[in-house]
Image (tube, rainbow, N blue to C red):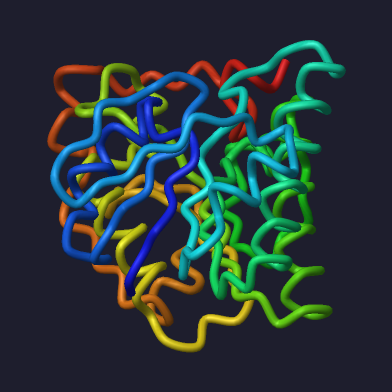
């Protein structure tokens, strides 16, 4: 790959991927609302994904996009609509117009957050979003399906769990995605051949996971970490009724 774009590169996940994905492309282009300082092998684009013109400028000349930009928690619907829904549309449409071949989309477990914790699910389970935020992620998955079927764009949608350095609460025993596993998952999503359209759960090798490993084999994803190593520290009392935890009220 010659050039890779990361949107929202200054955020929590973007900051980890920025260094972790070195070597996947000759050049990594970083897009954010604020000016970032480029390291060797990087380019920086200041822009807003809500603007199709900005998105096209960022995507131009890129072979693939890791789309992270957006509001990362629940918010008023108008804000979610503008940034997470319209902004994600802008990135997919820019990829189509600029001839980019693949998007790795940061979806979320909150796209299925209203499944009860007694139920283990796979990616064949219909969306049950727990918030407007979760709804926006289900919308992004729908965009990926549409742009693949209609335009041939490859799209991998990662239903990310809890992307933190270490588990800090009981829910993380099933939702944790470690930093090194997260980097591996995105790298595999960029490099695996002929993925077409694919939705996978983005979690580590957690023995208490409520989500099946559908699609991991297609990517070649083999996570190394298990949140169980932190169980004694965080406790295992689970006060939640639904997969979405605090998001599902």
The spot of residue 233 in percent (x, y) is 15, 18
Residue 43 percent across, percent down from the top left: 32, 44
Q: Nearer the viewer, residue 2 or 9?
A: 2
Q: Is residue 121 above or below residue 57?
A: below
Q: Work out which residue is located at the far bottom of the displayed protein and give it.
A: 194
- Position of residue 117 in the picture relative to residue 135 (left or right): left
Furthest-top residue in this view: 76
Q: x, y (%) of residue 139?
A: 79, 47
Front in this rendered view, residue 72 or 240: 72
The residue depicted at 62 percent of the width and 30 percent of the height is 48
User: So how many labels did they put on this image?
Assistant: 0
Instruction: Quadrant for residue 135, please give it.
Output: top right
Q: Residue drawn 51% across and 40% down?
A: 68
The quadrant holding residue 173 is top left
Quadrant containing the N terminus in the rendered view: bottom left
Asked if 170 appears above or below 225 in the picture, the reply is above
Q: Nearer the viewer, residue 33 or 231?
A: 33
In the displayed structure, would residue 14 be above or below residue 203?
above
Image point (49%, 57%), residue name: 65
Residue located 83% across and 79% down the image: 150
Q: Quadrant of the C terminus?
A: top right
Q: Nearer the viewer, residue 56 or 119?
A: 56
Seen in the picture, residue 181 relative to 110 is either above or below; the reply is below
User: Residue 57: where, in percent of width, then height?
Assistant: 59, 48
> Residue 163 vs residue 158: left or right?
left
């Amino acid at each position: 790959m010659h050039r890779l774009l990361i949107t929202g590169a200054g955020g929590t996940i973007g900051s980890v991927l920025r260094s972790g994905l070195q070597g996947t492309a000759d050049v990594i282009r970083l897009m954010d609302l604020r000016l970032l300082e480029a390291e060797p092998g990087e380019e920086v684009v200041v822009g807003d994904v809500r603007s199709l013109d900005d998105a096209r400028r960022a995507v131009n000349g890129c072979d693939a996009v890791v789309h992270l930009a957006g509001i990362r928690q629940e918010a008023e619907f108008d804000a979610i609509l503008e940034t997470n829904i319209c902004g994600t549309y802008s990135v997919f449409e820019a990829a189509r117009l600029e001839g980019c071949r693949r998007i790795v989309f940061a979806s979320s477990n909150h796209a299925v957050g209203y499944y009860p914790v007694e139920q283990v699910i796979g990616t064949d389970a219909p969306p049950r979003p727990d918030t407007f935020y979760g709804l926006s992620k289900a919308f992004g998955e729908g965009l990926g399906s549409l742009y693949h079927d209609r335009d041939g764009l490859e799209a991998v949608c990662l239903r990310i769990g809890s992307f933190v350095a270490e588990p800090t609460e009981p829910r993380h025993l099933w939702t944790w995605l470690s930093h090194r596993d997260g980097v591996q998952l995105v790298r595999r999503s960029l490099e695996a051949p002929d993925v077409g359209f694919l939705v996978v759960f983005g979690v580590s090798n957690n023995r208490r996971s409520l989500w099946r490993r559908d699609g991991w084999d297609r990517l070649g994803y083999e996570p190394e970490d298990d949140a169980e190593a932190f169980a004694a520290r965080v406790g295992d009392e689970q006060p939640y009724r639904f997969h979405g935890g605090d998001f599902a009220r």
